[in-house]
Image (cartoon, rainbow, N blue to C red):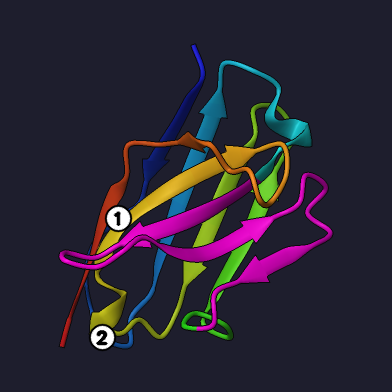
Amino acid sequence: QVQLVESGGGLVQAGGSLRLSCAASGRTFGTYVMGWFRQAPGKEREFVAAISWSGGRTYYGDSVKGRFTISRDNAKNTTVYLQMNSLKPEDTAVYYCVAGRELGALRLWGQGTQVTVTS
Protein backbone atom coordinates (compact mmCIF):
# COMPACT_ATOMS: atom_id res chain seq x y z
CA GLN A 1 0.00 0.00 0.00
CA VAL A 2 1.37 3.37 -1.03
CA GLN A 3 1.64 5.75 1.87
CA LEU A 4 2.91 9.24 2.52
CA VAL A 5 2.93 9.96 6.24
CA GLU A 6 3.64 13.47 7.47
CA SER A 7 4.86 14.42 10.93
CA GLY A 8 6.35 17.40 12.72
CA GLY A 9 3.46 19.81 12.68
CA GLY A 10 2.45 21.75 15.74
CA LEU A 11 2.04 25.11 17.39
CA VAL A 12 4.80 27.71 17.21
CA GLN A 13 5.16 31.43 17.78
CA ALA A 14 5.82 33.81 14.94
CA GLY A 15 9.51 33.90 14.12
CA GLY A 16 9.99 30.33 15.21
CA SER A 17 10.86 27.19 13.27
CA LEU A 18 9.42 23.78 12.56
CA ARG A 19 10.63 20.81 10.57
CA LEU A 20 8.13 18.65 8.78
CA SER A 21 8.92 15.11 7.67
CA CYS A 22 7.22 12.86 5.16
CA ALA A 23 7.96 9.15 5.14
CA ALA A 24 7.11 7.41 1.87
CA SER A 25 6.46 3.70 1.64
CA GLY A 26 4.79 1.12 -0.54
CA ARG A 27 6.79 1.68 -3.69
CA THR A 28 10.15 2.97 -4.79
CA PHE A 29 9.91 6.73 -4.39
CA GLY A 30 13.56 7.30 -5.11
CA THR A 31 12.76 8.38 -8.66
CA TYR A 32 9.71 10.47 -7.78
CA VAL A 33 9.43 14.23 -7.50
CA MET A 34 8.21 15.01 -4.01
CA GLY A 35 6.95 18.14 -2.39
CA TRP A 36 4.58 20.02 -0.12
CA PHE A 37 1.32 21.84 -0.55
CA ARG A 38 -0.65 23.63 2.12
CA GLN A 39 -4.23 24.71 2.65
CA ALA A 40 -5.45 27.29 5.11
CA PRO A 41 -9.11 27.51 6.20
CA GLY A 42 -11.20 29.15 3.52
CA LYS A 43 -8.32 29.32 1.06
CA GLU A 44 -7.25 27.32 -1.97
CA ARG A 45 -4.43 24.82 -1.83
CA GLU A 46 -1.08 26.49 -2.31
CA PHE A 47 2.13 25.06 -3.67
CA VAL A 48 4.91 25.29 -1.08
CA ALA A 49 7.95 23.43 -2.37
CA ALA A 50 9.12 20.47 -4.43
CA ILE A 51 12.34 18.57 -4.98
CA SER A 52 13.56 16.43 -7.86
CA TRP A 53 14.27 12.73 -7.37
CA SER A 54 18.00 13.34 -7.01
CA GLY A 55 17.60 16.41 -4.81
CA GLY A 56 19.49 18.45 -7.37
CA ARG A 57 16.58 20.74 -8.16
CA THR A 58 14.28 22.51 -5.75
CA TYR A 59 11.24 24.69 -6.34
CA TYR A 60 9.49 27.08 -3.98
CA GLY A 61 6.33 29.08 -3.84
CA ASP A 62 6.89 32.83 -3.75
CA SER A 63 5.48 33.19 -0.25
CA VAL A 64 8.05 30.84 1.31
CA LYS A 65 11.20 31.57 -0.70
CA GLY A 66 14.14 32.33 1.55
CA ARG A 67 12.39 30.97 4.64
CA PHE A 68 11.64 27.32 3.84
CA THR A 69 14.05 24.62 2.68
CA ILE A 70 13.08 21.27 1.18
CA SER A 71 15.39 18.27 1.24
CA ARG A 72 15.16 14.51 0.86
CA ASP A 73 16.90 11.33 1.89
CA ASN A 74 16.64 8.40 -0.53
CA ALA A 75 18.98 6.17 1.43
CA LYS A 76 16.46 3.52 2.45
CA ASN A 77 12.84 4.56 2.37
CA THR A 78 12.48 8.01 0.90
CA THR A 79 11.92 10.75 3.44
CA VAL A 80 11.27 14.36 2.51
CA TYR A 81 11.79 17.24 4.89
CA LEU A 82 10.54 20.81 5.00
CA GLN A 83 12.54 23.10 7.25
CA MET A 84 10.42 26.15 8.01
CA ASN A 85 12.11 29.19 9.51
CA SER A 86 10.91 32.69 10.31
CA LEU A 87 7.37 31.42 10.48
CA LYS A 88 4.50 33.87 10.15
CA PRO A 89 0.85 33.60 11.19
CA GLU A 90 -0.06 33.41 7.50
CA ASP A 91 1.88 30.14 7.29
CA THR A 92 -0.85 28.53 9.40
CA ALA A 93 -2.34 25.70 7.37
CA VAL A 94 -2.57 21.96 6.92
CA TYR A 95 0.58 20.86 5.13
CA TYR A 96 0.37 17.93 2.72
CA CYS A 97 3.19 15.81 1.40
CA VAL A 98 2.87 14.99 -2.30
CA ALA A 99 4.66 12.79 -4.82
CA GLY A 100 4.58 12.09 -8.51
CA ARG A 101 6.54 11.12 -11.58
CA GLU A 102 7.01 14.75 -12.56
CA LEU A 103 6.49 18.24 -11.14
CA GLY A 104 3.24 18.79 -12.98
CA ALA A 105 1.78 15.47 -11.87
CA LEU A 106 2.01 15.31 -8.08
CA ARG A 107 -0.97 13.01 -7.62
CA LEU A 108 -0.09 11.08 -4.46
CA TRP A 109 -1.07 12.87 -1.25
CA GLY A 110 -0.55 12.30 2.45
CA GLN A 111 -3.16 12.91 5.11
CA GLY A 112 -1.72 16.26 6.16
CA THR A 113 -0.25 17.77 9.31
CA GLN A 114 -1.42 20.95 11.00
CA VAL A 115 0.93 23.88 11.45
CA THR A 116 -0.30 26.79 13.56
CA VAL A 117 1.72 29.96 13.96
CA THR A 118 0.62 32.39 16.66
CA SER A 119 1.38 36.09 16.67
Q: Check disc 2 and report its element: helix, strand or loop.
A: loop
Quarter of the picture holding the C terminus = bottom left
Q: Horizontal placement of 104 versus 1: left or right?
A: right
The magenta region covers 34-62
Residue 61: x and y, percent? Answer: 54, 74
Instruction: Decide: is 11 above or below 90.
Output: above
Residue that label 1 marks:
9
Q: Which residue is mark 2?
A: 14
The type of residue carrying mark 2 is: Ala
Query: What's the residue at 67%, 68% (across, down)?
Result: 59
Q: Residue at x 36, y 44 (%)?
A: 7
Does the magenta portion include 108? Answer: no
Q: Earlier in the sequence, mark 1 or mark 2?
A: 1
- CA neighbours of label 2 inside 10 A, class few (<14), some (14 to 19), many (20+): some
- Using the image, determine if residue 64 lies above or below residue 101: below
Q: Residue at position x 32%, y 37% from top?
A: 111
Residue 84, image x and y in percent?
A: 45, 71
x, y percent for residue 85: 45, 79
Q: Position of residue 17 (x, y in %)?
A: 38, 74
Would residue 1 be found to the left or right of residue 33 on screen? left
Q: Name which residue lies at 24% across and 65% down.
A: 40
Residue type pointed to by label 1: Gly
